[in-house]
Image (cartoon, helix red, strand yellow):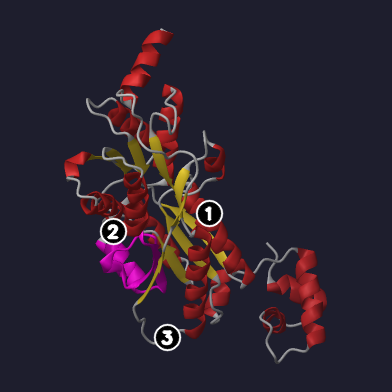
Amino acid sequence: MITTRDIAERLDLSVSTVGRALADDPRISEETKLRVREAAAEMGYVANRAARMMRGVASNVVGLVIPDIRNSFYSTIAHELSGNMEARDHQLILSETDDDPVRELRHLRELSASRVAGVIIVPTARPHHDSVRLLAALPHVQLLRRHPALGAQWFGIDDFQVLQRSTAHLLAHGHSRIGYVGGPSELRTGAERLRGFRSALEQAGLREEDGLAVLGKPSSVAHGRRAARRLLDDAAPPTALVTGSVPLTLGVLEELTSRGVRTPEELSVVGFGDEPGFSWWGPGLTTARLPVTEMATDCALWLLHRLTTKPHRDTAYTSVSTGSLIVRGSTAPPARSGRLPGERAAQRTRRSR
């Protein structure tokens, strides 16, 4: 490994002069700085971050802790955060927890030991008490999910409003038997989305049992398929479905496609998120579009400002983004044939055997 001593010997300079030149010290002339930088680049020198930080140079690394990078919701956020950090000479490093508090703690310990400048975290439902302690000593901000023990700095989405609006759209079409496919209600996001679904039913004068909610952990494509199967096989299946996450939406669409359920003639569907393929799935999926890019950008800029200004104490800061409903062809008034989606799908299955 090339060191500052190797560069010093090549240029016939002292090690301290080389170190100061690489740190852009004003005591070193621009000519010397240029010579040192050119030699360092030619020789393949890589700065020792730990040594630089011991000399008082601030870290420019920010940790991002998320549940699942396979979820395009989180990968989009990671992409936007990375771009914003890089544009301001910071680097984003990624940690994946799989919603496991023990893994979350392990990643936070490594980030703390690496002396990162700050952390952006989508926390698990029940963070370990040591995770709470570690984050208290680090500049950090919560994203999407919010846990009261982790501070009062949070960027999120109005999950209640998103699901209330999606459900109200189906109610306005005349649906009174609506199924909801959601994630775990132990997460604040899941609980708020379920509350929005139920609120829309209540405002329409319907009882809670008029809506069929199927919740599960994890919020995955597989669970979306299982939930759709369960709802459609019910003795009194819904005439419409609304979903509470991107993976769940994908799972529901896969199940409907495999069954040959015609949308919206047999079943209306409102999704969550607006993936590239949603606009051309079937008749085009009516879905809740979420301001993911804008939210990630605002979160990055807020944390970078906090790292720059270094306030003596953090004050509460909350940013809530609202979604919008994109109406396409997957929603319509309920079918009047007298047969329910599950019955029609089952009949087609029997004919195909």
Query: Residue shown at 82%/85% (left/top)?
Result: 31
* Dot 2: element: loop
Label 3 Cα crowd, 10 Å radius (few <14 / some 14-19 / many 20+): few
- Asked if residue 6 is among those painted magenta in the image, a careful observer would answer no
Q: Give the left or right position of residue 193, taking residue 63 as reference.
A: left
Query: Residue shown at 80%/84% (left/top)?
Result: 32
Magenta stretch, residue numbers: 129-158
Task: Specify the amino acid type for callout 3.
Answer: Pro
- Asked if residue 136 is among those painted magenta in the image, a careful observer would answer yes
Instruction: Identify whether 171 is placed above or below 251.
Output: below
Viewer-nearest residue: 64 or 210: 210
Viewer-nearest residue: 253 or 80: 253
Tell me residue 148's x, y (percent). 26, 67
Q: Is residue 286 visible?
A: yes
Q: Are marks 2 and 3 in contact (CB under 8 Å)?
A: no
Please tell me which of labels 1 and 2 falls first in the chain.
Answer: 1
Residue at which label 3 appears = 311
Q: Quadrant of the N terminus?
A: bottom right
Label 1 Cα crowd, 10 Å radius (few <14 / some 14-19 / many 20+): some
